[in-house]
């Protein structure tokens, strides 16, 4: 006989505590914020660290990803970031000189730039690799248009 104790419920089903409404709201906000943050980073305006060549070293540039990522808009004489065609681990900035069926004069000879490709030249003009070395580059490799150089200050302007 038990003395004043109620019988234990035994190994029946246990109920776990339900999440609070505040926790559910936070989870919902995070679930909505992640894709928005990814889209802003992928197609918005970001800061990129790029290889500026030996004299410049590394540069920090402000990059517009919208014009290339969503609109596929490429303009001659503008600078773009891309993975170096000869070294995918290195990100560089090159100026788009010609695109889509234009003829141009390279260092060695006249060259035809096929549709969907661009002719990129080094901004520094110090002989760093560009389309004179590796030929026309697919426009799809261009990651974004450089809006401004943020660092080093000597590259402002």
Image: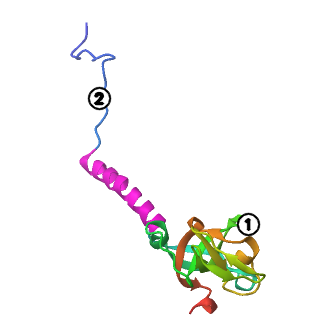
Question: Is 122 placed left or right of 16 in the picture?
Answer: right
Question: Is 126 placed left or right of 14 in the picture?
Answer: right
Q: Tell me if residue 130 can be seen.
A: no
Q: In which quarter of the image is residue 120?
A: bottom right
Residue 12 at what x, y percent from top left? 30, 18
Query: Which element is circle 1 on?
Result: loop
* N-term mark: 2 or 1: 2
Question: Is 151 placed left or right of 19 in the picture?
Answer: right
Residues 54 and 24: in front is 54
Of the 4 image quadrants, the one containing the C terminus is: bottom right
Q: Is residue 34 above or below residue 67?
A: above
Question: Is 137 placed left or right of 66 in the picture?
Answer: right
Residue 26 lies in the magenta stretch: yes
Residue 154 at what x, y percent from top left? 63, 92
Query: Which element is circle 2 on?
Result: loop
Q: What stretch is highlighted in magenta?
A: 20-43
Residue that appears at 73% across and 66% down:
86
Residue that appears at 36% across and 52% down:
31
For the residues labelled 2 and 1, the Cα–Cα distance comes to 60 Å
Residue 44 at what x, y percent from top left? 44, 70
Which residue does the numbered mark 2 point to in the structure image?
A: 15
Q: Residue 12 got which mark? A: none
Residue that appears at 32% across and 56% down:
29
**Number of numbered discs:** 2
Circle 1 packing at 10 Å, graded few (<14), some (14-19), many (20+), is: few
Residue that appears at 74% across and 86% down:
55
Q: In which quarter of the image is residue 60?
A: bottom right
Q: Residue 86 got which mark? A: 1
Residues 113 and 95: in front is 113
Residue 137 lies in the magenta stretch: no
Q: Is residue 76 above or below residue 134?
A: below
Of the 4 image quadrants, the one containing the N terminus is: top left
């Amino acid at each position: 006989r038990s003395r004043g104790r109620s019988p234990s419920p035994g190994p029946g089903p246990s109920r776990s505590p339900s999440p609070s409404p505040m926790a559910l709201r936070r989870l919902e906000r995070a679930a909505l914020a992640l894709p928005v943050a990814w889209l802003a980073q992928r197609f918005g305006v970001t800061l990129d660290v790029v290889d500026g060549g030996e004299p410049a070293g590394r540069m920090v540039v402000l990059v517009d990803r919208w014009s290339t990522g969503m609109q596929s808009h490429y303009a001659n004489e503008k600078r773009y970031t891309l993975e170096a065609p000869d070294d995918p681990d290195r990100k560089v900035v090159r100026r788009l000189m010609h695109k889509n069926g234009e003829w141009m004069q390279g260092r060695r000879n006249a060259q035809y730039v096929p549709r969907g490709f661009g002719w990129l030249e080094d901004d520094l003009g110090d002989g760093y690799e560009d389309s004179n070395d590796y030929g026309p580059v697919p426009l799809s490799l261009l990651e974004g248009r450089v809006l401004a150089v943020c660092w080093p200050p000597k590259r402002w302007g």
